Image (cartoon, rainbow, N blue to C red):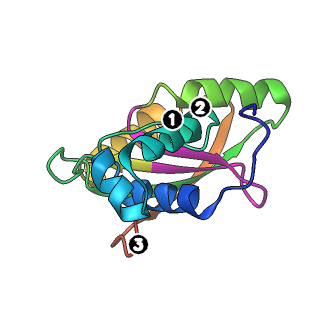
Amino acid sequence: MAKDTPRPLDRFDSRILEILSREGRIPVTALAQAVGLSKTPCQTRLKRLQDEGYILGFQALLDPHKLNRAHIAFVEVKLSSTREGALEAFNAAVASVPEIEQCHMIAGAFDYLLKVRTENIESYRRVLGEEINALPHVSSTSTHVSMQAVKDKLG
């Protein structure tokens, strides 16, 4: 079955995905035991879930405090133009700013919402002034500083 044609997941597939979303480094033997399969059928299912695009990859979750990137700001961005060329230019340029952890196009009062991680408010001000405001077609920004991450699935 092609990646674009989703097939229904059975209870074993669903359980594998649930466990991997919490414990991406779980050994296959432990995963198999947790879902009630032997190792080989579990490996086969895991490979199929990857091939079909249910599992996009695996990554390490890094501690932002140890990396001096604990300051989180959410930035509303309005563009001066929302023509396709302007959107494409902004989308391409935003990828070059390492402090921008996430970028979402938004339907609403502004055009994009950025999640920005920096060391502190001073470094955020620098990133905002020198990097974000210099992105193509940015006409205005509004910043919301996170005081505490109450729920953050990625760490």
Q: Is residue 91 positioned above or below 19 on the image? A: above
Toward the bottom, the furthest residue is 150
Residue 84 at x, y = what percent?
A: 83, 29
Question: Where is 87 relative to 25, above or below?
Answer: above
Q: Is residue 107 visible in this depiction of the protein? A: yes
Q: Which residues are magenta?
A: 98-115
Residue drawn at x 72%, y 53% is 106
Q: Nearer the viewer, mark 3 or mark 1?
A: 1
Q: CA distance from mark 2 to mark 3?
A: 31 Å
Is residue 47 on the magenta stretch? no
Direction from residue 97 to residue 122 in the image, left or right:
left
Element marked by disc 3:
loop
Q: Residue at x 25, y 48 (%)?
A: 69
Q: Amino acid at mark 1?
A: Lys
Residue 5 position by quadrant: top right
Residue 129, percent from left and from top: 44, 39
Residue that numbered label 3 is attached to: 151
Q: Earlier in the sequence, mark 3 or mark 1?
A: 1
Q: Is residue 113 magenta?
A: yes
**Residue 115 locus on image (x, y percent):** 48, 51
Q: Residue 51's mark?
A: 2
Q: Tell me whether circle 1 and circle 2 mark residues in contact (CB < 8 Å).
A: yes
Asked whether, in this view, residue 78 is left or right of residue 107, the answer is left
* Amino acid residing under circle 3: Lys
Q: Which residue is mark 1?
A: 47
Give the residue at the far right of this rendering: 83
